[in-house]
Image: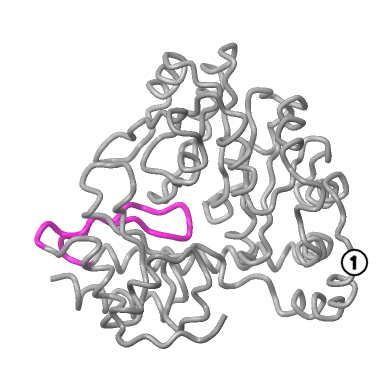
């Protein structure tokens, strides 16, 4: 991509705000996208470089072998796994082709709704202003409208809040017998406390009406490699999703990453601990801003409602970029009350987080 020359920082902001990636080319601090800054370690890049000729010159493996690589990482049989070119590919298949009617709590990750044909999506509002999910009301609405797919993102994006495991199990029981698959998106669960206890991966065999979706880009810091997977004990549903994927959907770099990933299990655990420590300190500092409502995060980003007398979310976002070269996300475009009062901020290093807090205070009013 040729280097773009912007006449002003404001012009640069207008360009960046319409992009969906490629941010590293434009020299600003990215507090918008949500990834692990402490993984992968340098040794992973060394291995990819050493194998670059074979990776580039040869066809990568196909679906069954890729599922075996993921299965080794998560200790699950390969027949339960579908590997996607990022979670987005699997979302497109489920929302865009399989679901006759899909119900999604909102605000949430917009792609579930965006990928669906017009008229196929039911948006279920989270409780306001707490943004909690009432699973009993959600189940009742899913059954009432005849949804065949229900989605819960936990921790949710943009709110960064978990849905308790007990609530999800109750939801599964309520939906059982109503021809409705529950998709549980655990893409950010690696940054939550006690993640092994709250994930439903280990009990997937107990719930044939459940599928777990996971983007690996966020937790493993590999947004450019594009890897995601679906895990379900429902073989029929797995086959339906798998049938929507073309034969070589994952490139050789992603395949090689999956092959060597088990060697770096401890490094990955340590990286998530560092992310959580930075995030927790960041949360305290944001809470100290007078008038700011800060939702306690379970993921690597923090959701905030701006003080009543502060400028709007879009205006604060724009000013942060123009004055401090820092990019965050506002909530305009999310289905929720007062969307223009909310911002979502990705946690980065302690130094960058501290700089953002100072910059936010500088531009809010």
Quarter-wise, where is residue 281 in the image?
bottom left
The crowd level at tag 1 (other Cα within 10 Å; few <14, some 14-19, many 20+) is few
Quarter-wise, where is residue 137 in the image?
top left
Residue 52, x across and y down, in percent: 84, 77
Image quadrant occupied by the C terminus: bottom left
Direction from residue 97 to residue 124 in the image, left or right = left
Work out which residue is located at the far left of the displayed protein and give it.
309
Which residue does the image show at 41% across and 35% down from the upper left?
105
Per the image, the residue denoted by label 1 is 58
Magenta-drawn stretch, dominant element (helix, strand or loop) = loop
Query: What's the magenta region?
Result: 289-309
Image quadrant occupied by the N terminus: bottom right
Which residue does the image show at 49% across and 46% down from the upper left?
111
338 over 3 or under it: above or below: above
Task: Report helix, strand or loop for mark 1.
Answer: loop
Direction from residue 306 to residue 173 in the image, left or right = right
Which residue does the image show at 27% across and 62% down from the upper left?
287
Work out which residue is located at the far top of the displayed protein and give it.
177
Residue 133, x across and y down, in percent: 38, 33
């Amino acid at each position: 991509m040729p280097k773009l020359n912007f006449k002003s920082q404001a012009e640069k902001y207008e360009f960046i705000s319409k992009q969906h990636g490629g941010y590293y080319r434009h020299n600003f601090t990215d507090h918008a996208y949500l990834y692990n800054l402490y993984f992968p370690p340098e040794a992973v890049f060394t291995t990819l470089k050493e194998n670059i000729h074979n990776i580039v010159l040869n066809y990568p493996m196909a679906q069954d072998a890729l599922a075996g690589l993921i299965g080794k990482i998560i200790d699950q049989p390969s027949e339960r796994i579908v590997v996607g070119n990022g979670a987005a590919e699997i979302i497109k298949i489920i929302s865009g082709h399989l679901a006759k009617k899909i119900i999604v709590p909102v605000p949430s990750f917009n792609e579930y709704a965006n990928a669906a044909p017009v008229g196929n999506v039911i948006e279920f509002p989270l409780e306001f202003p707490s943004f909690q999910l009432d699973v009993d009301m959600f189940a009742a609405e899913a059954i009432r409208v005849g949804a065949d797919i229900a989605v819960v993102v936990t921790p949710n994006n943009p709110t960064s809040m978990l849905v308790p495991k007990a609530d999800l199990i109750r939801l599964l029981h309520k939906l059982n017998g109503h021809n409705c698959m529950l998709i549980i998106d655990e893409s950010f669960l690696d940054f939550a406390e006690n993640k092994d206890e709250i994930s439903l991966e280990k009990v997937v065999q107990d719930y044939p009406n459940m599928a777990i979706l996971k983007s690996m880009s966020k937790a493993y810091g590999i947004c450019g490699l594009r890897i995601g997977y679906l895990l379900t004990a429902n073989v029929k549903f797995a086959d339906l999703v798998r049938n929507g994927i073309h034969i070589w959907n994952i490139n050789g770099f992603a395949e090689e990453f999956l092959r060597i990933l088990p060697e770096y299990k401890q490094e990955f655990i340590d990286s998530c601990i560092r992310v959580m420590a930075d995030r927790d300190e960041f949360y305290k500092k944001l809470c100290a801003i007078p008038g700011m409502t800060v939702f306690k995060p379970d993921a690597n980003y923090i959701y905030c409602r701006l003080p009543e007398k502060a400028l709007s979310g879009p205006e604060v976002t724009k000013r942060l970029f123009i004055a401090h070269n820092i990019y965050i996300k506002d909530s305009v475009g999310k289905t929720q009350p007062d969307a223009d009062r909310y911002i979502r901020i990705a946690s980065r290093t302690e130094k960058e987080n501290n700089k953002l807090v100072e910059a936010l205070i500088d531009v809010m009013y």
